[in-house]
Each structure stands twice: as structure tokens, then as C-alpha cells.
Image (spheres, rainbow, N blue to C red):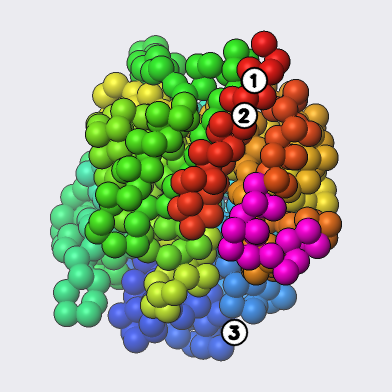
């Protein structure tokens, strides 16, 4: 009888947490648990045998994070095969000859912090293929793909795992409300992994036993395939330097009984569960048969969109009728914002369409731009473009601040990854980067639709006009153009470039991004001295000052430097005036007068053309 046949006639008991138990045995959370397969195999074997003795009929390999993306981060990328084969052999030894099955544990891939380029489906499949092949070589009975928060990754993993010929279980981590970290519903998950060829579907980790019961009920109404359920032991509590899970073995077993009644075929434990939990589980499930399945009544399409708030009046409204002009001003480093408010007032009177407020540029702390932007809009009456980075907030804080920005009437956001904290002057600061520019744009677009990052409704949409950054200072414009296409696909509706000094580069960028169909404003930062030009060229990421321009600035400073810098900026405007629909002015050091002179020059050119 095959595993899948067996699951149609009886409910099997899985094992419990590996990481929790290794931590309890003194292995630090900063250690690599999977490497223990090579350096402390006796410890891993001891734990597996404890679960087998507790009554687990399926035990997992200690290989959850043994993929290239995780191991390479600690210099062990070359040991993917060795670690997975060792993990399989250890679990096989613990299983013995008593009919216990071994599941090869495969977890999700990780992205390095600050890295914007996403792995392609083929690259994902390649990493999963290497791990699954090694586990199969080690002698596992099935492959358990678990704790996935990305449906795209899970589908790639299923397809790679199927190549081994072993049964494949696809398990996703669902949060409260029955959505995964990427917003996938139970229904969408079920349809996608069945289409990819999964033999068993399931859920694990996530929000705890009670929520998992609800997920199992939904799955049982959608699929005839076996269902796995591995719940956490509730939510962790940090107490005296350790994480404590409060759900008792008896409570956990009672909830597992509900999972069985809801339709689960394989039930085990995830974070916080111990051999005691599994022993109670095994006693409860002994002799139970799978519950009958009943198809669900027809449901509304998964992921139905919520109401979208129509775009509000925007600084882009004049696009195509006249030049749109935005100006960037730096928030103050301290509490006094009188100068920036006065500068904003002068710029509004000069005819600027919007004020850009960067967020802690070069990773140096300044006044929060959301509060400052709200103040400028209220007191000056000019639209503010808030720059939001992925560096300073985690996913939770980001959503809170964006909802707050919408409440304050800030409806234009430029989404950027942000300079890493290491660039700044605060040695103890760290970067977050839960989101980079692509995923931040996607989040903003979702919030416009009235849902948060995991697809739960937030009420009316936020109504953001979403902007993106574009860097034309590159040797390969096609790569940058493709990045912009992806940002547009995610929801970007305009783009502003890094400061650019070569008109030909901007004209090439316009040509290569014409199919994007969104406004592209070139960044103009007037130079003020030779030192300023050399600093920008040599030290500021994303900015290139051509040799000819730096030669013109050589030996110049103060008024002479500012005059020549303005002359260069005006020549750029002349060279691009016919093609550009607007300009993004970035006066250095908050020198509002430089922006005012360029605004007057642009307006004069417009009058000449009438």
C-alpha cells in the first residue's frame, strides 16, 4: 500500500517542531540548524528518535532551510547536497524498520536584504530541484514543502519536487483570515498547487491551531486529495530570554481532533510543539479514519477586488498641456521647519506643481516627511510627493504609516528601496528592507484596491498616485527600462529619474521606456562648485557627472560655480525641451533660489513656443 493509499483509510500522526527543540537543547537562534546534520548528527538523531517514540508515524528531516539561498548566506552554499542527504539518512535511521515514514522537509527560499532582483521561476525551480534530488537520494518517502508564504515559490517547488517521482505535499502558512503572507487565499492556493501536480495539500505554522482548523475546513470543501495540518502551539511569548509557547499538549490534541473531523489526513505539530504534544496527539488520533468530504457551495472568485477610490486631482493633470515641474526639498535635520515651509511657499507662487520630500536621504536622519508633508500641504496649499523607502519600516509599520499618510491627505508616493543604513552616520542603525521598490509599489497598489499586504480589507482604497525612480546613468539602458516596465506592471503611474547631466542619456531613456506609457521626469540637480561635481560623481550612488561637465566646473566655487551649474542645467533643458513633458528639480543644499531661476527659465521657454 502506498502512502497516498494509506492516507485514504487512516489518519497519520506527524512529528513536532525541530527548531524549538534544538533551541531548548541550547542551540542558539543565530545558529544554522541544518548544518547540525554534519557537525552534530547525534543530537539531530536523538530528537528524531524522541518523536518516533512519542508515536509519530511520519518524521521530518532536519532540512527545512537547507536550500542554496539560505546556506550561501553563511558560506555553506556548496554543501546543499551533503546537508540534505545527511538529514535524510539521520531521519531514516531514527525511523528504523517499524513502518515509520520519512518526509523530506523543504522550506522557502530567502531574498538577501536590499536585493531588488527577484528570482525567476526557473531559478527558483533550480534551487528546489537540487534540494529535493538530494533528499530523494538520501531515502525519504515523500517531500513536504512547508511554511511557504509565496504561491509563486511554492508552485515552482512543487514542479521541481515532482521530478523525483516521490509523493509531494504542498503546505502554505496561512495567517488570520485565511490568507498567506503574499495575500493568497485558500482557494487560490488549492487551485494552483493542484494544477502544478501536488499529491497532498496542507497548511502549517501561521496563526495557531484554531485558525488552522478553519483552513482545513475550507480545503476539505475544495479538494479530494489528502490534507496535512501542522499547527503551531499557539503564539510565542518572550519570557526571561526565551520564547515560550503556552498551548498544552492536551489543548493541542483536542484541536487536532477538530482538524481530523474537518478533513485532515496527516496531522503534526509546528513551532512550539514537543514530543509531549505529539504523544498526546498520537493517543487522540489512534484508530481514527479520515472524515468524509463535502463539496463547497459555489464561492465568489478568490481575491475579489474591493472598491477602488478613483484617482484624486494630481500634479500630473497638466501633463501634455504644459511642462509639469516638481522640486525636491530636504526635510530639516532638526525641529525647525520654517525655512522649508517658506521655500515651499515661494515655489508655489512661482508655479511649481509639487514638492518632493525625500525620506532620510543617504541614510541620515531628518524630520519625518509624512508629518512635514501634511503640514506643507495644509499651510502652503501645494501638493507634496512623499518618498517612502523600504529601509526604515518593516511590513507592519509600513502599512500603518501609509494608511496614516492617506488619512492626512497625502496621496502621491514615490516608492524607492532606499540607501542602506550602513551609508549613514549612525553606526548602530540597521536596514529593514522587508520591502524593496518593486514590492513597495505592489503594496501601494493593493492598498489602492482596499486590501492590505495579505489581502484583508482596509475599507476604502488609499487613492495613492504611485511614483517610481528611474536611473538613466547606466551602461545598459535596456535593463533599467525593463525594471521600469515591472514597476509599471505593479502599479507605478509616473517616474522621476536620478540627476542626469547628459541630455542624450535622458532622450535614450525616453525612447526605451516609451511603451511604459507613463510620465518620465528627468532629474536636474544644478552643480555649484568643482568640489560638488566631484563628490556627486565619485561618492553618491546612481549619479554620474560626465567628464566634460566636470571639466567645466574645474576651479569654480561660490557664485561662479553656481552660475556655471545653472548654465549647464539650462542647456540640458534646451536639449530636452521638445521631448520632456516636465522636470524634476533638485536644488542642492536647499538652495531654493536655484530652483526658482530654473522654473522661470522653463516658463520663459514655454512662452516662446506659444
Instruction: Compare residues 517 and 384 and report the one nearer the observer.
Output: 384
Secondary structure of the residue carrying tag 2 is helix
CA distance separating discs 2 and 1: 6 Å
For the record, the magenta segment spans 550-566
Residue designated by label 2 = 602
- Side (left or right) of 606 relative to 400: right
Q: CA distance from mark 1 to mark 3?
A: 71 Å
Q: As rendered, which of 139 and 181 lies closer to the eye?
A: 181
Q: Provide the secondary structure element on which disc 3 rests.
A: helix
- Pair 1/3: label in front: 1
Q: Main secondary structure of the magenta part?
A: helix
Is 51 one of the magenta-colored residues? no
Residue, x 59% and y 25% (percent of image)?
Answer: 603
- Residue at 29% x, 62% y is 334
Residue tagged 3: 38
Which is nearer the eye, 453 or 596? 596
Amino acid at each position: 500500500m502506498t502512502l497516498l493509499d494509506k492516507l485514504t483509510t487512516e489518519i497519520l500522526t506527524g512529528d513536532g517542531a525541530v527548531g524549538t527543540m534544538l533551541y531548548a537543547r541550547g542551540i542558539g537562534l543565530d545558529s544554522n540548524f541544518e548544518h547540525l546534520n554534519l557537525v552534530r548528527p547525534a543530537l539531530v538523531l536523538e530528537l528524531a528518535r524522541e518523536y518516533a517514540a512519542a508515536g509519530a508515524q511520519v518524521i521530518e528531516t532536519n532540512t527545512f532551510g537547507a536550500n542554496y539561498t539560505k546556506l550561501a548566506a553563511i558560506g555553506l552554499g556548496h554543501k546543499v547536497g551533503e546537508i540534505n542527504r545527511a538529514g535524510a539518512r539521520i531521519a531514516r535511521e531514527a525511523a528504523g524498520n517499524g513502518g515509520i515514514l520519512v518526509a523530506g522537509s523543504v522550506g522557502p527560499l530567502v531574498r538577501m536584504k536590499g536585493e531588488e532582483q527577484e528570482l525567476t521561476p526557473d531559478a527558483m525551480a533550480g534551487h528546489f530541484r537540487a534540494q529535493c534530488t538530494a533528499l530523494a537520494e538520501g531515502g525519504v518517502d515523500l517531500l513536504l514543502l512547508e511554511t511557504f508564504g509565496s504561491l509563486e515559490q511554492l508552485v515552482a517547488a512543487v514542479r521541481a519536487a515532482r521530478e523525483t517521482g516521490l509523493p509531494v505535499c504542498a503546505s502554505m502558512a496561512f495567517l488570520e483570515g485565511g490568507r498567506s503572507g503574499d495575500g493568497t487565499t485558500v482557494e487560490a492556493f488549492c487551485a494552483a498547487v493542484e494544477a502544478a501536480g501536488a499529491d497532498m495539500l496542507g497548511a502549517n505554522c501561521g496563526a495557531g491551531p484554531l485558525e488552522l482548523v478553519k483552513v482545513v475546513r475550507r480545503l476539505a470543501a475544495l479538494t479530494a486529495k489528502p490534507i496535512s495540518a501542522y499547527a503551531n502551539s499557539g503564539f510565542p511569548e518572550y519570557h526571561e530570554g526565551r520564547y515560550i509557547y503556552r498551548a498544552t499538549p492536551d489543548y493541542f490534541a483536542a484541536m487536532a481532533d477538530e482538524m481530523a473531523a474537518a478533513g485532515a489526513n496527516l496531522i503534526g505539530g509546528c513551532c512550539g510543539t514537543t514530543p509531549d504534544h505529539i504523544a498526546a496527539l498520537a493517543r487522540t488520533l489512534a484508530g481514527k479514519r479520515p472524515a468524509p468530504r463535502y463539496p463547497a457551495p459555489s464561492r465568489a472568485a478568490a481575491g475579489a477586488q474591493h472598491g477602488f477610490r478613483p484617482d484624486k486631482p494630481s500634479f500630473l493633470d497638466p501633463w501634455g498641456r504644459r511642462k509639469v515641474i516638481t522640486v525636491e526639498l530636504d526635510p530639516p535635520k532638526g525641529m525647525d521647519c520654517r525655512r522649508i515651509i517658506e521655500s515651499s511657499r515661494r515655489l508655489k507662487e512661482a508655479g511649481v506643481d509639487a514638492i518632493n520630500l525625500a525620506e532620510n536621504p543617504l541614510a541620515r536622519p531628518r524630520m519625518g516627511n509624512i508629518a512635514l508633508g501634511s503640514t506643507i500641504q495644509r499651510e502652503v496649499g501645494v501638493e507634496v510627493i512623499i518618498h517612502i523607502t523600504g529601509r526604515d519600516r518593516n511590513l507592519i509599520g509600513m502599512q500603518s504609516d501609509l494608511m496614516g499618510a492617506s488619512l492626512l491627505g497625502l496621496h502621491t508616493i514615490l516608492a524607492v528601496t532606499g540607501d542602506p543604513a550602513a551609508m549613514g552616520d549612525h553606526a548602530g542603525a540597521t536596514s529593514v528592507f522587508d520591502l524593496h521598490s518593486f514590492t513597495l509599489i505592489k503594496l501601494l497598489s493593493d492598498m489602492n484596491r482596499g486590501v492590505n499586504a495579505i489581502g484583508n480589507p482596509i475599507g476604502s482604497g488609499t487613492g495613492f498616485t504611485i511614483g517610481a525612480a528611474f536611473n538613466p546613468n547606466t551602461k545598459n539602458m535596456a535593463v533599467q527600462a525593463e525594471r521600469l516596465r515591472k514597476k509599471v506592471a505593479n502599479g507605478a503611474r509616473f517616474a522621476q529619474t536620478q540627476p542626469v547631466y547628459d541630455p542624450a542619456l535622458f532622450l535614450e531613456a525616453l525612447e526605451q521606456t516609451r511603451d511604459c506609457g507613463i510620465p518620465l521626469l528627468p532629474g536636474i540637480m544644478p552643480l555649484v562648485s568643482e568640489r560638488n561635481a566631484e563628490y556627486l560623481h565619485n561618492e553618491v550612488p546612481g549619479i554620474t557627472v560626465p567628464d566634460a561637465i566636470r571639466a567645466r566646473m574645474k576651479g569654480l566655487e561660490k557664485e561662479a560655480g553656481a552660475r556655471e551649474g545653472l548654465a549647464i542645467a539650462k542647456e540640458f533643458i534646451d536639449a530636452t525641451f521638445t521631448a520632456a513633458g516636465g522636470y524634476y528639480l533638485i536644488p542642492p543644499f536647499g538652495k531654493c533660489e536655484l530652483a526658482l531661476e530654473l522654473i522661470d527659465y522653463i516658463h520663459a521657454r514655454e512662452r516662446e513656443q506659444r
